Image: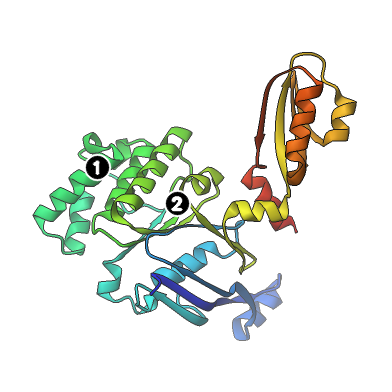
Amino acid sequence: MPVISVENLRKVYRVPVKEEGGLSSLRHFFRRRYREIEAVRGITFRVERGEVVGFLGPNGAGKTTTLKMLVGLIKPTSGKVRVLGYDPFERRKDFLKRITLVMGQKQQLIWDLPPMDSLRINAAVYEIDDETFKRRVALLAEMLGIEHRLHQPVRKLSLGERMKAELLAALIHDPEVLFLDEPTLGLDVSAQISIRRFLRNYNEEFNATIILTSHYMADIEALCDRAMVIHRGRLIFDGDLYELAERVMPFKEIYVEFKGEIPVEELQRIGEIREIEGQEVKLLVRRDEVFDKVRLIMERWNIDDLSVTDPPLDEVLAKVFEG
Protein backbone atom coordinates (compact mmCIF):
# COMPACT_ATOMS: atom_id res chain seq x y z
CA MET A 1 0.00 0.00 0.00
CA PRO A 2 1.43 3.44 -0.91
CA VAL A 3 2.09 5.87 1.93
CA ILE A 4 0.25 8.64 0.05
CA SER A 5 -2.57 8.00 -2.41
CA VAL A 6 -4.32 10.88 -4.19
CA GLU A 7 -7.09 10.34 -6.72
CA ASN A 8 -8.75 13.10 -8.75
CA LEU A 9 -8.17 15.68 -6.00
CA ARG A 10 -9.86 19.07 -6.48
CA LYS A 11 -10.12 22.24 -4.45
CA VAL A 12 -12.42 25.08 -5.51
CA TYR A 13 -12.69 28.40 -3.62
CA ARG A 14 -15.73 30.67 -3.84
CA VAL A 15 -14.49 34.26 -3.87
CA PRO A 16 -16.83 37.29 -3.47
CA VAL A 17 -16.91 39.62 -6.49
CA LYS A 18 -17.26 43.29 -5.61
CA GLU A 19 -17.15 46.28 -7.93
CA GLU A 20 -15.91 49.72 -6.91
CA GLY A 21 -18.23 52.46 -5.68
CA GLY A 22 -20.68 53.04 -2.86
CA LEU A 23 -23.75 51.73 -4.68
CA SER A 24 -21.89 48.52 -5.58
CA SER A 25 -20.89 48.12 -1.93
CA LEU A 26 -24.52 48.44 -0.87
CA ARG A 27 -25.64 45.86 -3.45
CA HIS A 28 -22.79 43.60 -2.35
CA PHE A 29 -24.05 43.82 1.24
CA PHE A 30 -27.52 42.52 0.36
CA ARG A 31 -26.77 40.22 -2.56
CA ARG A 32 -23.28 38.88 -2.96
CA ARG A 33 -21.95 37.51 -6.18
CA TYR A 34 -19.22 34.93 -6.26
CA ARG A 35 -16.78 33.47 -8.73
CA GLU A 36 -15.06 30.13 -8.43
CA ILE A 37 -11.29 29.68 -8.41
CA GLU A 38 -10.13 26.13 -9.05
CA ALA A 39 -6.86 25.95 -7.12
CA VAL A 40 -6.30 22.21 -7.65
CA ARG A 41 -7.79 20.50 -10.71
CA GLY A 42 -8.17 16.75 -10.40
CA ILE A 43 -4.61 15.61 -9.65
CA THR A 44 -3.74 11.94 -9.10
CA PHE A 45 -0.50 10.42 -7.78
CA ARG A 46 0.98 7.90 -5.35
CA VAL A 47 4.06 8.05 -3.14
CA GLU A 48 5.76 4.96 -1.72
CA ARG A 49 7.47 4.63 1.65
CA GLY A 50 10.93 6.20 1.78
CA GLU A 51 10.53 8.29 -1.38
CA VAL A 52 11.75 11.89 -1.48
CA VAL A 53 9.54 13.73 -3.96
CA GLY A 54 9.97 17.30 -5.16
CA PHE A 55 6.72 19.19 -5.69
CA LEU A 56 7.37 22.03 -8.12
CA GLY A 57 5.43 24.85 -9.69
CA PRO A 58 5.25 28.66 -9.92
CA ASN A 59 3.56 30.80 -7.29
CA GLY A 60 -0.18 30.15 -7.28
CA ALA A 61 0.16 26.75 -8.99
CA GLY A 62 -1.56 24.90 -6.13
CA LYS A 63 1.44 23.37 -4.30
CA THR A 64 0.71 24.65 -0.81
CA THR A 65 -3.03 24.06 -1.20
CA THR A 66 -2.28 20.43 -2.05
CA LEU A 67 0.04 20.03 0.94
CA LYS A 68 -2.61 21.48 3.24
CA MET A 69 -5.14 18.96 1.96
CA LEU A 70 -2.65 16.13 2.48
CA VAL A 71 -2.21 17.06 6.15
CA GLY A 72 -5.89 17.79 6.75
CA LEU A 73 -5.79 21.58 7.15
CA ILE A 74 -8.08 22.07 4.14
CA LYS A 75 -10.98 19.88 3.08
CA PRO A 76 -10.95 18.88 -0.59
CA THR A 77 -13.89 19.89 -2.76
CA SER A 78 -13.83 16.40 -4.28
CA GLY A 79 -11.54 13.44 -4.81
CA LYS A 80 -9.91 10.93 -2.48
CA VAL A 81 -6.84 11.32 -0.26
CA ARG A 82 -5.21 8.68 1.92
CA VAL A 83 -2.04 9.24 3.92
CA LEU A 84 -0.79 6.22 5.87
CA GLY A 85 -4.25 4.75 5.33
CA TYR A 86 -6.04 7.69 6.98
CA ASP A 87 -8.36 10.38 5.65
CA PRO A 88 -6.30 13.46 6.62
CA PHE A 89 -9.30 15.75 7.13
CA GLU A 90 -10.61 13.55 9.94
CA ARG A 91 -7.56 14.78 11.92
CA ARG A 92 -7.35 11.61 13.97
CA LYS A 93 -4.84 11.61 16.80
CA ASP A 94 -3.02 8.51 15.57
CA PHE A 95 -2.63 10.10 12.13
CA LEU A 96 -1.29 13.43 13.44
CA LYS A 97 1.36 11.60 15.48
CA ARG A 98 2.76 10.06 12.29
CA ILE A 99 3.15 13.16 10.08
CA THR A 100 4.65 16.61 10.27
CA LEU A 101 4.38 19.86 8.30
CA VAL A 102 7.18 22.43 8.12
CA MET A 103 6.54 25.76 6.41
CA GLY A 104 9.60 27.89 5.86
CA GLN A 105 7.64 31.14 6.24
CA LYS A 106 5.95 30.05 9.51
CA GLN A 107 7.43 29.30 12.91
CA GLN A 108 6.31 27.25 15.88
CA LEU A 109 9.13 28.13 18.28
CA ILE A 110 8.36 30.73 20.96
CA TRP A 111 10.41 33.83 20.13
CA ASP A 112 11.64 34.80 23.61
CA LEU A 113 12.21 31.28 24.95
CA PRO A 114 15.04 28.84 24.22
CA PRO A 115 14.19 26.10 21.69
CA MET A 116 14.42 23.50 24.46
CA ASP A 117 11.33 24.97 26.15
CA SER A 118 9.32 24.71 22.93
CA LEU A 119 10.59 21.17 22.45
CA ARG A 120 9.32 20.19 25.88
CA ILE A 121 5.90 21.63 25.00
CA ASN A 122 5.85 19.56 21.80
CA ALA A 123 6.89 16.48 23.76
CA ALA A 124 3.92 16.99 26.10
CA VAL A 125 1.54 17.47 23.15
CA TYR A 126 2.72 14.24 21.52
CA GLU A 127 2.83 12.37 24.86
CA ILE A 128 6.53 11.56 24.62
CA ASP A 129 8.11 10.21 27.80
CA ASP A 130 11.15 11.95 29.25
CA GLU A 131 13.69 9.27 28.37
CA THR A 132 12.55 9.11 24.74
CA PHE A 133 12.50 12.91 24.57
CA LYS A 134 16.10 13.25 25.76
CA ARG A 135 17.32 10.53 23.39
CA ARG A 136 15.45 12.04 20.44
CA VAL A 137 16.69 15.59 21.12
CA ALA A 138 20.29 14.41 21.50
CA LEU A 139 20.16 12.47 18.22
CA LEU A 140 18.50 15.20 16.13
CA ALA A 141 20.54 18.02 17.64
CA GLU A 142 23.74 16.16 16.76
CA MET A 143 22.53 15.50 13.21
CA LEU A 144 21.61 19.18 12.83
CA GLY A 145 24.72 20.49 14.61
CA ILE A 146 22.85 22.76 17.04
CA GLU A 147 23.51 21.09 20.43
CA HIS A 148 25.04 24.34 21.74
CA ARG A 149 22.09 26.53 20.64
CA LEU A 150 19.12 24.82 22.29
CA HIS A 151 19.35 26.84 25.51
CA GLN A 152 19.60 30.30 23.91
CA PRO A 153 16.48 32.40 23.20
CA VAL A 154 15.17 31.85 19.69
CA ARG A 155 15.48 35.58 18.92
CA LYS A 156 19.28 35.30 19.36
CA LEU A 157 19.68 32.52 16.83
CA SER A 158 20.68 33.09 13.22
CA LEU A 159 18.08 32.34 10.55
CA GLY A 160 19.82 29.08 9.67
CA GLU A 161 20.02 27.98 13.32
CA ARG A 162 16.36 28.90 13.78
CA MET A 163 15.35 26.73 10.81
CA LYS A 164 17.33 23.80 12.21
CA ALA A 165 15.57 24.23 15.55
CA GLU A 166 12.22 24.34 13.72
CA LEU A 167 13.07 21.05 12.03
CA LEU A 168 14.04 19.51 15.35
CA ALA A 169 10.71 20.62 16.86
CA ALA A 170 8.80 19.21 13.88
CA LEU A 171 10.58 15.83 14.10
CA ILE A 172 10.59 15.33 17.86
CA HIS A 173 7.69 12.83 17.64
CA ASP A 174 9.44 10.66 15.03
CA PRO A 175 7.01 11.20 12.12
CA GLU A 176 6.93 8.81 9.19
CA VAL A 177 5.88 11.39 6.59
CA LEU A 178 7.39 14.87 6.26
CA PHE A 179 5.65 17.63 4.32
CA LEU A 180 8.18 20.42 3.82
CA ASP A 181 7.06 23.70 2.26
CA GLU A 182 10.07 25.89 1.35
CA PRO A 183 12.28 24.73 4.28
CA THR A 184 15.33 26.64 2.99
CA LEU A 185 13.47 29.87 2.18
CA GLY A 186 15.66 32.92 2.82
CA LEU A 187 18.67 30.93 4.08
CA ASP A 188 22.21 31.59 2.91
CA VAL A 189 24.01 29.02 0.77
CA SER A 190 25.84 27.44 3.72
CA ALA A 191 22.63 26.97 5.72
CA GLN A 192 20.82 25.57 2.66
CA ILE A 193 23.54 22.96 2.17
CA SER A 194 23.40 22.02 5.85
CA ILE A 195 19.60 21.56 5.77
CA ARG A 196 19.82 19.46 2.60
CA ARG A 197 22.50 17.24 4.13
CA PHE A 198 20.38 16.73 7.23
CA LEU A 199 17.25 15.84 5.25
CA ARG A 200 19.18 13.38 3.08
CA ASN A 201 20.67 11.70 6.17
CA TYR A 202 17.31 11.67 7.94
CA ASN A 203 15.66 9.96 4.98
CA GLU A 204 18.39 7.32 4.81
CA GLU A 205 18.48 6.75 8.57
CA PHE A 206 14.73 6.48 9.22
CA ASN A 207 13.32 5.64 5.76
CA ALA A 208 11.04 8.68 6.11
CA THR A 209 8.81 9.71 3.22
CA ILE A 210 9.37 13.35 2.25
CA ILE A 211 7.30 15.69 0.08
CA LEU A 212 9.30 18.85 -0.59
CA THR A 213 8.32 22.12 -2.24
CA SER A 214 11.06 24.61 -3.00
CA HIS A 215 11.90 27.46 -5.36
CA TYR A 216 15.58 26.52 -5.04
CA MET A 217 16.32 23.96 -7.74
CA ALA A 218 19.47 22.97 -5.83
CA ASP A 219 17.19 21.54 -3.10
CA ILE A 220 15.39 19.38 -5.64
CA GLU A 221 18.54 18.23 -7.43
CA ALA A 222 20.28 17.34 -4.15
CA LEU A 223 17.39 15.49 -2.49
CA CYS A 224 14.78 14.22 -4.96
CA ASP A 225 14.86 11.21 -7.25
CA ARG A 226 11.37 12.07 -8.46
CA ALA A 227 9.61 15.34 -9.15
CA MET A 228 6.00 16.30 -9.69
CA VAL A 229 5.34 19.54 -11.57
CA ILE A 230 2.04 21.33 -10.96
CA HIS A 231 0.88 24.25 -13.09
CA ARG A 232 -2.44 26.11 -12.81
CA GLY A 233 -3.73 23.40 -10.50
CA ARG A 234 -2.93 20.51 -12.85
CA LEU A 235 -0.23 17.87 -12.48
CA ILE A 236 1.65 18.19 -15.77
CA PHE A 237 4.64 15.96 -15.06
CA ASP A 238 5.54 13.13 -12.66
CA GLY A 239 8.91 11.43 -13.02
CA ASP A 240 12.65 12.10 -13.29
CA LEU A 241 13.33 15.80 -13.81
CA TYR A 242 16.11 15.05 -16.27
CA GLU A 243 13.60 13.12 -18.36
CA LEU A 244 11.56 16.33 -18.45
CA ALA A 245 14.67 18.27 -19.48
CA GLU A 246 15.22 15.90 -22.40
CA ARG A 247 11.65 16.39 -23.57
CA VAL A 248 11.48 20.16 -23.19
CA MET A 249 15.07 21.19 -23.96
CA PRO A 250 16.64 18.39 -26.07
CA PHE A 251 20.15 19.81 -25.99
CA LYS A 252 23.20 20.03 -23.79
CA GLU A 253 25.46 22.91 -22.86
CA ILE A 254 29.13 22.77 -23.90
CA TYR A 255 31.52 25.02 -22.00
CA VAL A 256 34.81 25.75 -23.80
CA GLU A 257 37.79 27.83 -22.66
CA PHE A 258 39.97 28.77 -25.66
CA LYS A 259 43.70 29.48 -25.57
CA GLY A 260 43.61 32.01 -28.37
CA GLU A 261 41.06 34.05 -30.26
CA ILE A 262 37.49 32.77 -30.12
CA PRO A 263 36.27 31.66 -33.60
CA VAL A 264 32.78 33.11 -33.20
CA GLU A 265 31.56 32.62 -36.78
CA GLU A 266 32.67 28.99 -36.94
CA LEU A 267 31.20 28.23 -33.51
CA GLN A 268 27.84 29.58 -34.67
CA ARG A 269 27.78 26.77 -37.25
CA ILE A 270 28.40 24.22 -34.49
CA GLY A 271 25.70 25.34 -32.09
CA GLU A 272 23.86 28.25 -30.49
CA ILE A 273 26.20 30.57 -28.61
CA ARG A 274 24.64 31.33 -25.24
CA GLU A 275 27.39 33.36 -23.64
CA ILE A 276 30.90 34.69 -24.29
CA GLU A 277 33.04 35.99 -21.45
CA GLY A 278 36.78 36.50 -21.92
CA GLN A 279 38.12 33.26 -23.43
CA GLU A 280 35.08 31.25 -22.28
CA VAL A 281 32.13 30.25 -24.47
CA LYS A 282 28.90 28.39 -23.72
CA LEU A 283 27.25 26.57 -26.63
CA LEU A 284 23.95 24.75 -26.92
CA VAL A 285 23.95 21.65 -29.13
CA ARG A 286 21.45 18.84 -29.69
CA ARG A 287 21.91 15.91 -27.33
CA ASP A 288 22.40 13.41 -30.16
CA GLU A 289 25.15 15.57 -31.69
CA VAL A 290 27.22 16.24 -28.54
CA PHE A 291 29.91 13.62 -29.17
CA ASP A 292 30.60 14.76 -32.73
CA LYS A 293 30.59 18.46 -31.79
CA VAL A 294 32.99 17.97 -28.88
CA ARG A 295 35.38 15.96 -31.06
CA LEU A 296 35.24 18.66 -33.74
CA ILE A 297 36.06 21.43 -31.25
CA MET A 298 38.98 19.51 -29.74
CA GLU A 299 40.45 18.64 -33.16
CA ARG A 300 40.11 22.12 -34.66
CA TRP A 301 41.19 24.53 -31.87
CA ASN A 302 43.58 24.82 -28.96
CA ILE A 303 41.57 24.83 -25.74
CA ASP A 304 42.36 24.94 -22.02
CA ASP A 305 39.14 23.36 -20.74
CA LEU A 306 35.91 21.75 -21.92
CA SER A 307 32.86 20.34 -20.13
CA VAL A 308 29.36 19.17 -21.06
CA THR A 309 26.36 19.73 -18.77
CA ASP A 310 22.56 19.70 -18.88
CA PRO A 311 20.79 23.08 -19.06
CA PRO A 312 19.95 24.47 -15.59
CA LEU A 313 16.71 22.93 -14.30
CA ASP A 314 15.25 26.31 -13.42
CA GLU A 315 15.48 27.23 -17.11
CA VAL A 316 13.80 23.95 -18.04
CA LEU A 317 10.89 24.66 -15.72
CA ALA A 318 10.63 28.27 -16.85
CA LYS A 319 10.24 27.02 -20.43
CA VAL A 320 7.56 24.51 -19.30
CA PHE A 321 5.55 27.21 -17.54
CA GLU A 322 5.89 29.63 -20.45
CA GLY A 323 4.44 26.96 -22.73
Q: Residues within 10 Å of mark 1 (few under 14, many from 20)?
A: some
Question: Residue farthest to the bottom?
Answer: 31
User: Considering the numbered disc 2 on the image, is that residue within a helix, a strand or a loop?
Assistant: loop
Mark drawn on residue 105: 2
Residue 191 left/right relative to 119: right
Nearer the observer, 119 or 177: 177
Residue at the location (61% across, 51% down)?
242
- Circle 1 or circle 2, nearest the eye: 1
* Residue 264 sits above or below residue 54 on the image: above
Q: Is residue 10 above or below residue 226?
A: below
Relative image position of residue 34 (x, y in whole percent): 64, 80
Q: Of the residues shown, which amino acid type is indicated by label 1?
A: Ala
| Image quadrant assignment for residue 174 | bottom left
Percent position of residue 287, x then y: 73, 45
Could you tell me how many numbered marks the image carries?
A: 2
Three-letter code, disc 2: Gln
Q: Is residue 229 left or right of residue 278?
A: left
Q: Is residue 126 or residue 24 the one in the foreground?
A: 126
Element type where label 1 sits in the image: helix
Point out the tag, 1 or 2, that comes first from the N-terminus: 2
Foreground pick, 183 / 242: 242
Q: Residue 141: which disc?
A: 1
Query: Label 2 neighbourhood size at 10 Å, few (<14), some (14-19), many (20+)?
Result: few
Depth check: 272 or 297 in front? 297
Q: Is residue 123 left or right of residue 43?
A: left
5 to the left or right of 17: left
The residue at 42%/59% (across/down) is 51
